[in-house]
Image (cartoon, grey):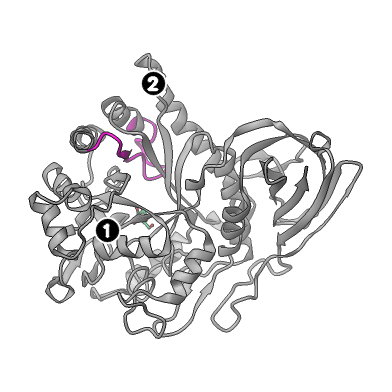
Amino acid sequence: MTSTIDPAFTVGQVNPLLFGTFVEHLGRCVYTGIYEPTHPTADADGFRGDVAGLVQELGATIVRYPGGNFVSNYRWEDGVGPRANRPRVLDLAWKSIETNQVGTDDFLAWCNRIGIQPMLAVNLGNRGLSEAVDYLEYVNGAAGTRYADQRVGNGYAEPWNVRLWCLGNEMDGPWQIGHKTPLEYARLAQEVARAYKTFDPELQLVACGSSNTTMPTFGEWERVVLEHCFDDVELISAHAYYEPVDGDEVSFLSSSTHMDRFIRGVVATADHVAAKRHSGKRINVSFDEWNVWFAARHGEREEERSAASEAPELIQDVYNALDAVVVGSLLITLLRNTDRVGVACQAQLVNAIAPILTVAGGAAWRQTIFHPFALTAKYARGTVLMLAGDQGQVDTPAYGPVEQVWAVATHDPEAGELTVFAVNRSLTDAASWQLRLGAFGDVRLTEHLVLAEDDRYAVNSSDMPDRVVPHPGTSGITDCALDVTMPPASWHCIRLACH
Ligand code: AHR
């Protein structure tokens, strides 16, 4: 297998917002996840210091909050003001008791402390235009009007200046509180978007796309929503979770094919609406929920639950080495689409389908999927470059024949850095891959890290938090070509110096 990378094969600049994450009031993501006032590492506001440190190491740039399904029955008013006065309420999305000890101000203050950009979702499920505008005023309004003054009274004098807003969540899903037909949602989103843009024309707004590609209205939903909201929003959402279906790990390892086709389908629909309007405007994708999620397992646990409780142990998937390779391949897909993906958020951040796991009152550790995210967020810099050539082939039951090596490169000419991210999507065959780099002149290998385990089901745990970590890979440069040995089901980060 021989491929070529050339600085001219440009897709676009690396979009830093591809490395987003998601905090939902779901299970133990918030309570005993990011927030636990009795934890030995808690800061003055009750947020765990050990978790904050791991979030910074993860390198997430943006965080979506507070849901997810949760937002569709959320009353933002319940989560602001003195904690002692906040009500305990029933959250219908996850059938849990919400104590409201963390709300908008607490969360946004945490974002400021750890240096991560917030992206707020507004409830368009069981609430509407009026409450959405009140919320925007509370968060971003200058002192002098009712809700902005309420925020000032709660101790936050300055507007939070949140730039990115999601207009509801998965409103096409029958499971969603207040779910809607395409037309019902399109009209509401249009009204809210216009009011938001009247408040501040510089806001970036995300309309809900389909919950996933299996929804019966996928494609049609995006068309109807954008035909109404095209002038008023910048982004349309996409969500996708991957797992081996009926044990089909070959297709699971090629989940990046699905994500790539999904992005292209949404982009095509958005551009179709643009064409009909004779418009040069480009609506981009907010891939604001993606990950590996063993939904089948989650279903079993749900049935076991009888009564609503506080911070229940929900969807605490423990990820193995194969899952980490898949996550790495999904990040490659996002980079390959950097020109049309405006935001992407891995779902979620802590405990619930997350790269970080915690014990209440105890340790926090990195799951296997933490590593490809952290390394990609750290080293993807400059311009995204595609590759040309022969990347082999794997036959998959779900997607047909796909490239065996799924790869992308980033090039930062000023720093003299070229980084290759690549996955061998064969479960059984190693790959010998040659990369021609002649166009970069003198190239030296800085570091080659690989995630691959003989036992692909190996996991990290509180006892063995570093059971699965990246190791040095096997590669070498001769005559301006890099030769890489790729074990089956492996993810690679290859850093090169070029001047
Ligand atoms: O991330 C978990 C859930 O998945 C979110 O609440 C919802 O938006 C999606 O269905």
Q: Position of residue 247 (x, y in %)?
A: 58, 58
Report if the beta carbon of the residue with label 1 is closer than 8 angstroms to ligand 1.
yes
According to the picture, the residue beneath numbered tag 2 turns out to be: 274
Q: Classify residue 86 by image quadrant.
A: bottom left
Asked whether disc 2 touches disc 1, contact meaning CB atoms under 8 Å apart, the reply is no
Relative to 330, 37 lies left or right:
left
Q: Tell whether position 438 is magenta.
A: no
Q: Position of residue 28 (x, y in %)?
A: 36, 72
Relative height, residue 295 to residue 202 (above, below): below
Q: Main secondary structure of the magenta part?
A: loop
Quadrant for the C terminus, please: top right
Residue drawn at (18%, 36%), measured in percent from left and top? 195
Q: Which range of residues does the magenta coloring cover? A: 200-221
* Alpha carbon distance from label 2 to label 1: 32 Å
According to the picture, the residue beneath numbered tag 1 turns out to be: 70
Q: Quadrant of ligand 1?
A: bottom left
Q: Classify residue 111 by image quadrant.
A: bottom left
Q: Position of residue 271 (x, y in %)?
A: 43, 24
Callout 2: SS = helix
- The answer to which of 118 and 208 lies nearer the viewer is 118
Residue drawn at (77%, 49%), measured in percent from left and top? 497
Q: Is residue 352 visible?
A: yes
- What's the residue type where badge 1 is placed? Phe
- The answer to which of 427 and 155 lies nearer the viewer is 155
Crowding near the residue tagged with mark 1, few <14, some 14–19, many ≥20 C-alpha atoms within 10 Å: many
Q: Position of residue 361 (x, y in %)?
A: 40, 85
Residue drawn at (30%, 36%), measured in percent from left and top? 202
Report if the beta carbon of the residue with label 2 is closer than 8 angstroms to ligand 1.
no
Q: Classify residue 82 by image quadrant.
A: bottom left
Disc on res. 168: none
- The answer to which of 157 and 477 lies nearer the viewer is 157
Q: Is residue 248 visible?
A: no
